Image: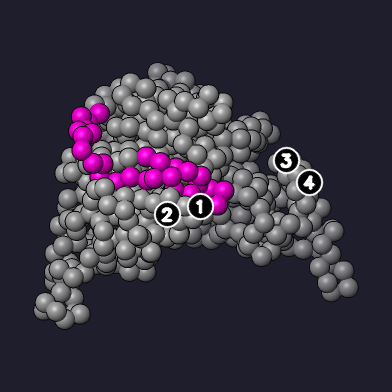
Amino acid sequence: MVNNTAEIGPGASAATRVPGHWIEIRGLAKHFAGEVALDHVDLDIMRGEVHGLVGANGAGKSTLIRCLAGVTVADAGRITIGGEEYRQGSPQAAEKAGLAFIHQELNLVPHFSALENMLLGAPKAKRLGLIDWKRSGAGARAAAEKVGIRFPLETKVSELGIGERWLVMIGKALARDASMIAMDEPTASLSAAETEHLFALIRELARSGVAILYVSHRLDEVLDLSDRITVLRDGEIVGRTLRGSLDKKGLIRAIVGHDVQTREDRKRADVARSGLPLFSARNVARGSAVKDVSFDLWRGEILGLGGLIGAGRTETARLAFGVDRLEAGHFELEGERLAIRGESDAIARGIALVPEERRSQGLMLDQSVAFNITIAALKPLRSIAGLPIVSSGKVRAEAGRMVRRLSIKTPGVGARISGLSGGNQQKALIARWLGHGMKVLIVDEPSRGVDIGAREEIHDAIRDLARAGVGIIVISSDVEELALVADRVVVLHEGRVTGELTGDDITEARIVELSYLDRGELGGEGT
């Protein structure tokens, strides 16, 4: 293989200037059903470093981590840890070698306590044939103190927040004397305060000699935290850089192979706001989550809903789609008051929702790509009009058309959708609503957990729908995304609208400012 790896920053990589690589990966290759997942990858990881690993979905990051974790055996290549040959295909060998892996979907038992989860699978001291939890838990309690756990370890995991669960997983790794911890999208569901705490902990772990393999699509975090960054594309390492040697734009270019649109490049649509709005919320309310929310959405407009987690954005979307019932106020479609009693009513009126949790709320993971794309509108796909029999040929043809339209990467429309990357799953959910008379599309966290290339493709799909006259509501915790994609932004705080931003006022700073202020602090003015 020709080595086309680029040093994307000035000077040599850290691997050439610091002796004593702890983990050495040489020539690692892996194929799945004829497709290249890893193409003779060389990678070094050192003790006490934060090593960023980035790349588009499908670039090979997960396969590389699975090889390290002992879950997948490479077709070729070898791994050595501390100079010793590492036996692939054995999770037990990975744990013995000091490797720990924390995935985005945290692998914890909800009805077990934090302590029980930390000790799950570990040898335990016994007394008179029974587990001696005091002696067994000594190491776990020491690890808990080190990572800053303040809640009782007897607390059930189901009662913990997502940030606290992350601390349990890190404590579990340290209790097993982990020398390397791989973290996959660690901040995807964390608040700003929890994220800062995690960053401080990562830096402290690195100072103590623990290696951190940091995998994230949030490139600002990767650039801030990482001592070194490795870029994968199509199974190959296409770039390595040192801290401070590359900016975000250069890193994006390395990941996708070309420049992508930035907020500065964005030209907002000239939306005609005359006559009746396409969709309106009129003083809608439910409990303490949504309080007197009003806004208008115009045909062909992308309206952003901003605010902190818990501000009422998702709750408003669920009310609009009929998942939850209104306690006050109403919605209007083209000036007509709506009576939405459930999701089927919303769909019948041309309102669609791509939910925040696509895997648990939007997708049928054990079904095919074709099934997931076409499930919302099977009537036109019947074999014989009037009969409840769907033509499999029409289903495949329609799904194939949508796969091509949105450039969904899949082995075929018959493949299980669970095997697709997060970005392609998200595009399949959007494809579900294309071409079926949808007037309003609500997309909650459109690019959560997807890479920068897939994010751009999702944004392009949203813009194409808006140009076709669909009204789009985009909910995002990523203020950069809102500033990039929205024509107008309405910001919520604690269930109330605190402001509306248009034109040049749509900036990340203004969205953040309004996210933290209520109307009283704004003097009653929303903008």
**Any mark on residue 148, and which?**
3
Q: Position of residue 209 (x, y in %)?
A: 65, 35
Question: In the displayed image of the protein, which residue is found farthest to the top?
Answer: 10
Neighbourhood count class around disc 4 (C-alpha, 10 Å): few under 14, some 14–19, many 20 upward: few
Q: Secondary structure at mark 3?
A: loop
Check if mark 3's residue and mark 2's residue have beta carbons within 8 Å. Answer: no
Q: Does the magenta run of residues contain 276?
A: yes
Question: Residue placed farthest to the left in the image?
Answer: 384
Q: Are marks 4 and 1 in contact (CB under 8 Å)?
A: no
Which three-letter amino acid code belongs to the residue tagged 3? Gly
**Disc 3, disc 1: CB below 8 Å?**
no
Say if 95 sits above or below 234 in the image.
below
Identity of the amino acid at label 2?
Leu
Which badge, 1 or 2, comes first in the chain's sequence? Answer: 1
Quarter residue 111 falls in = bottom right
Residue with the mark numbered 1:
286
Asked if labels 2 and 1 touch by Cβ distance under 8 angstroms, the answer is yes
Q: Nearer the viewer, mark 4 or mark 1?
A: 1
The residue that label 2 is drawn on is 319
**Going from the N terminus, do you reach mark 3 or mark 1 first?**
3
Quickly name the residue at label 4.
142
Q: Which residues are magenta?
A: 268-295
Is 178 on the left-hand or right-hand side of 367? right
21 sits to left or right of 148 = left
